[in-house]
Amino acid sequence: AQSVAQPEDQVNVAEGNPLTVKCTYSVSGNPYLFWYVQYPNRGLQFLLKYITGDNLVKGSYGFEAEFNKSQTSFHLKKPSALVSDSALYFCAVRDRNYGQNFVFGPGTRLSVLP
Amino acid sequence: GAGVSQSPSNKVTEKGKDVELRCDPISGHTALYWYRQSLGQGLEFLIYFQGNSAPDKSGLPSDRFSAERTGGSVSTLTIQRTQQEDSAVYLCASSLSGFTDTQYFGPGTRLTVL
């Protein structure tokens, strides 16, 4: 069965500094990987996904993530954080060879301080 | 175009009552998902519909939970004999089709069981 870990409950970063939100996964086969963001009092929004091809994926709002198969990681990054990036971030995985459902991580709360 | 809509946005009920939660997916999306998000927690997969195929019910936590999707569009999640631990935000998402498609989430229904 697949699983997702987001080892940090909370990440604090100063505005203008680079940010990283970590995600590691476990699947029996090859993964499809996703990042979603949840702003306060709003629904989840898609940021980016890795399906196949280039390991570096670029997404919405200047975010990017790198698929690292050997480390089974898919960390979310942004070169320069904005206060408006403060939100709850979820990593999700779907195993290509197992079942239909996504598994979401527990979420990481990002706070960007002015 | 219109996104995923859910109703009601808030529902307060008494323990032991039945509740129905509704999801209207994006027109043309064949896949529909239900998730549950408890306070401060990640997303828990409940059920997945894909076209006319039998739904994947593997995430339903008990036989008090059921869902149907009529005409391949609107879906209803029913919780019978509600318990206080059912209190959560219930999220619906739809995608165009397939495993790799981005899921678009509705705003959720906040269920409170007194």
Image (spheres, coloured by chain):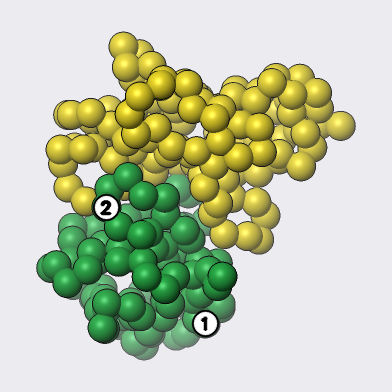
Question: Label 1 is placed on what type of residue?
Answer: Pro
Mark 1 highlights which residue?
B8
Q: Residue at x 37, y 59 (%)?
A: B95
Q: Residue at x 54, y 54 (%)?
A: A44
Q: Quadrant of the C terminus of chain A?
A: top right
Left or right: residue A78 compared with residue B19? right
Q: Secondary structure at mark 2?
A: loop
Q: Is residue A93 visible?
A: yes
Residue located at (81% from left, 31% from top) = A113
- Residue closest to the eye, A98 or B78: A98
Q: Tell me how far mark 1 sits from mark 2, CA to CA.
A: 28 Å
Q: Amino acid at mark 2?
A: Gly
| Residue A83, x across and y down, in percent | 79, 37
Subunit under mark 1? B
Nearest to the eye among marks 1 and 2: give it: 2
Q: Which residue is mark 2?
A: B98
Q: Quadrant of residue B78?
A: bottom left
Q: From the image, state the color of chain A.
A: yellow
- Residue furthest to the top: A70
At 47% from the left and 58% from the top, the residue drawn is B104
List x then y, in percent, for residue B102.
42, 50
